[in-house]
Structure formats: C-alpha cells, structure tokens
Amino acid sequence: MIATIGLAIGIVFLAELGDKSQLMALTFALRYRWWVVLGGITAATAAVHVLSVAIGHFLGAALPTTAIAWVAAVTFLAVGVWTLRELAGDDDGEPSPPRFATAAPFLVVLSAFLLAELGDRTMFATAALATDNNWAGVWLGSTIGMVAADALAIAAGIVLGKHLPERAIGFGSGLLFLFIGALTALNTAAPAIGLPAAIALALAAPAAAALTLWWLHTRRMAREMMVTSADTMDADERRVGGQH
C-alpha cells in the first residue's frame, strides 16, 4: 500500500510538472485566495482520479474526451477575453473586478479543473496504475501528487501577486487563460504537431490580445491628448479675448 502510494505520487507529480494544470493553478492563484484554489484543485483531482481508478481504461474509451476538451478550450478562451474586456474598459484608476471573479471562486476552480483533467494524460496514467496496484493507494497517491505539483504553481502565484499591481495581475491572468485555451484547442484539433509547436502557436493568442490592447490604449491616449489640447486652446483664446 505504501509503495503504491509512493509510486503514484512520483509518477503523477512528474507528469504534472510543466503541464497546463500548473499554469491554471498559477492563474487562479493570482485572482483568488490560495486555500480556495487548493481546495478546488483537490476536490476536482479526487473526483477525476476516483473515476479513473474505479473504471480504468474503459472510462477513457467511454468519455467523449474530444468534446470535453473543446468545451474546456472555449471556456478558457471566453474567460480570458471577458477578463481583458472588463479591465480594458477602465483605464483610469483601479479596474473593477471581472464578473467571473465575483462568482463562487471554489466552483470556478472546481469546474475548470474538472474539464481540464477529464481525458488528460494523468487520468490515463492513474487508470493504468490501478490495473496492477491497489486502487485505494493509486487514488490517494495520484491525488497527492497532482495537488503537490499544482501547489508549487500556487506558491508562484502568491509570490507574483505580492509584487505586481492589481491591473497587471488582471491582464496577466487574462492572457494566461487565452494561452491555456489556445493550447487546449490546438492539442485537441491537431495532437500530432507536438507540444513545442503547440506552445509556439498558442502564444499567438495572448500576443494578439496584448497588441490589440496596446493599440486601443494608444488610441484612447491620443484622443484624450487632442481633447486636452483643444480645451487648452479654447481657454487661451477666451483669455486673450477678455484682455482685448
């Protein structure tokens, strides 16, 4: 039992390093309190892994993993766009929190990780381990391993959150959600292209969003300067006219 738990912890922990779930954990840690994020991840991981352990590889064959992946991709892209839209709407002062951030944070994290992990490689790794090892040990070890890996990302999010202003955190989390959504969509649509190529292509989504936001900000600043200049000229003309 102890050996099975240790084996599952090691395999899942290593599999999760650099995975999209760590990026999701970091992103959520920038928006929500760390214990809420960790609780949502733990609940989602325990639920997914108990399913994979209980039904094994038959579950993977029965689940519409492609459809689930597309739903997850669209969800992440929508959250990213909505976050950036809410923040870009207020360039003066502190931004109002995005609407998705006012929802129950635990449910947001839970649902996002459930969608992301259904059909993920760690789910199938857990099912494979359960075929030859104690199912309870595999479930406990795989859950601990994934939560431990994502806890590292949460810690990184906490550190970044203490040193970044609120607006930077908001834009950063929005861009990260766009990247995760684009990466999920690419892996679903063209799994044969490989992870490095998928990452390179997925970076185009946040890059395009960042350029669009910069262009909109530049236009807004130019209009404000023109209005200020026109107001100054009118004031000068009235002052000169009053002196005559």
Image (spheres, rainbow, N blue to C red):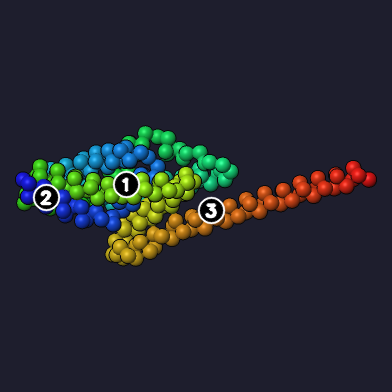
Mark number for residue 90? none
Q: Secondary structure at mark 2?
A: helix
91, 190: nearer the viewer: 91
Query: Marks 2 and 3, how far apart in space?
Result: 47 Å
Q: Secondary structure at mark 1?
A: helix
The residue indicated by pointer 1 is 154
19, 240: nearer the viewer: 240
Mark number for residue 213? 3
Residue 100: image location, x then y, percent? 42, 39
Q: Residues within 10 Å of mark 3 (few under 14, many from 20)?
A: some
216, 37: nearer the viewer: 37
Q: Residues within 10 Å of mark 1 (few under 14, many from 20)?
A: many
CB atoms of marks 2 and 1 within 8 Å = no
| Left or right position of 109 against 85 | left
Mark number for residue 6? 2
Labels 1 and 3: the sequence-earlier one: 1
- Disc 1 marks which amino acid? Ile
Residue 224: image location, x then y, percent? 67, 49
Nearest to the eye among marks 1 and 3: give it. Answer: 1
- Disc 3 marks which amino acid? Leu
